Amino acid sequence: MPATPGSSPPVVLRLQGLRKAYQEGGRRHEVLHDATAEILRGEFVVLLGPSGSGKSTLLNLVCGIDLPDEGVVQVAGEDLTALSERERTLFRRRHLGFVFQFFNLLPTLTVLENLLLPLELKGRVGAEEEARARGLLERVGLAARADAFPDRLSGGEQQRVALARALVHDPDLILADEPTGNLDPDTGERVMDLLDSLVREDGRTLLAVTHSRELADRADRILRLDHGVLQETSRGRAASGGEAAP
């Protein structure tokens, strides 16, 4: 639902008091400690943190693959902690888009078929949906490769397909996990340009986990996870005239 004039955009992601711990060698290891944050519709937010800080755990909670020991994960107004495993799976298919470090394209499907898969999982694929998928391929510069298989594409091309796939079913929230981590610097820069433009042109909401300062510099806000504590370290380029604070 769009915001009315003069109102704040709706909250797409709300994390409230998240705690998550695992048993390691007979000892309890707390990965998240009272993690709280909100992301508004249309925001591009980056999550930073050292390896092992809990970024992957947080993403798993946001997409409902795992549940917190305490706290609430709310996406598009739905409390994922109140849903069954099947309900969370169906919610994930309908409301979330994903971009992974290693692309995760199905090798036995063509580029176009990979894009249509999220729509098939939602139970609808017709002429309108195929036209939408082809339109997204045009936007990422790969319209001519619709019938190619992923192994015929470069790494950068595969990630561009993955970006289009994450958008094709009009998700409420896009989650990107190290989207440029498997690309060389030049290709990564081009993918970052494309991700930035696609998200902002369509008013999408994005949470990106990354080690890349270049990607962080493009964000509206930066969150940092360290020793289980989630903090906002910068208001991003929106408050600094185009560059995120270190």
Image (cartoon, grey):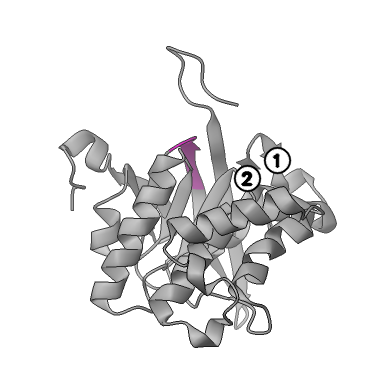
Task: Identify which residue is drawn at 47% across, 58% down.
Answer: 138
User: Residue 149: image x %, image y %?
Assistant: 59, 82
Q: Which residue is mark 2?
A: 73
User: Residue 192: image x %, image y %?
Assistant: 33, 61
Q: Along the polypeptide, which appears first: circle 1 or circle 2? A: 2
**Element under disc 2:** strand
User: Residue 169: image x %, image y %?
Assistant: 64, 51
Rendered-image quadrant of the N terminus:
top right
In the image, residue 148 sits, relative to residue 246, either above or below, namely: below
| Residue 40 covered by magenta stretch | yes
Instruction: Looking at the picture, tell me which residue is in the foreground, 197 or 69.
Output: 197
Q: Which segment did they paint magenta?
A: 35-42
Magenta residues: mostly which secondary structure?
strand
Task: Identify which residue is drawn at 25% across, 75% down.
Answer: 185
Q: In the shown orientation, is residue 64 left or right of residue 97?
A: right
Q: Which residue is mark 1?
A: 79
Could you say which quadrant of the image residue 146 lies in? bottom right
In the image, residue 135 sits, relative to residue 40, either above or below, namely: below
Kindly identify the amino acid type of the residue bearing the numbered disc 2. Val
Kindly identify the amino acid type of the residue bearing the numbered disc 1. Asp
**Element under disc 1:** strand
Instruction: Looking at the picture, tell me which residue is in the foreground, 124 or 195.
Output: 124
Q: Are marks 1 and 2 in contact (CB under 8 Å)?
A: yes
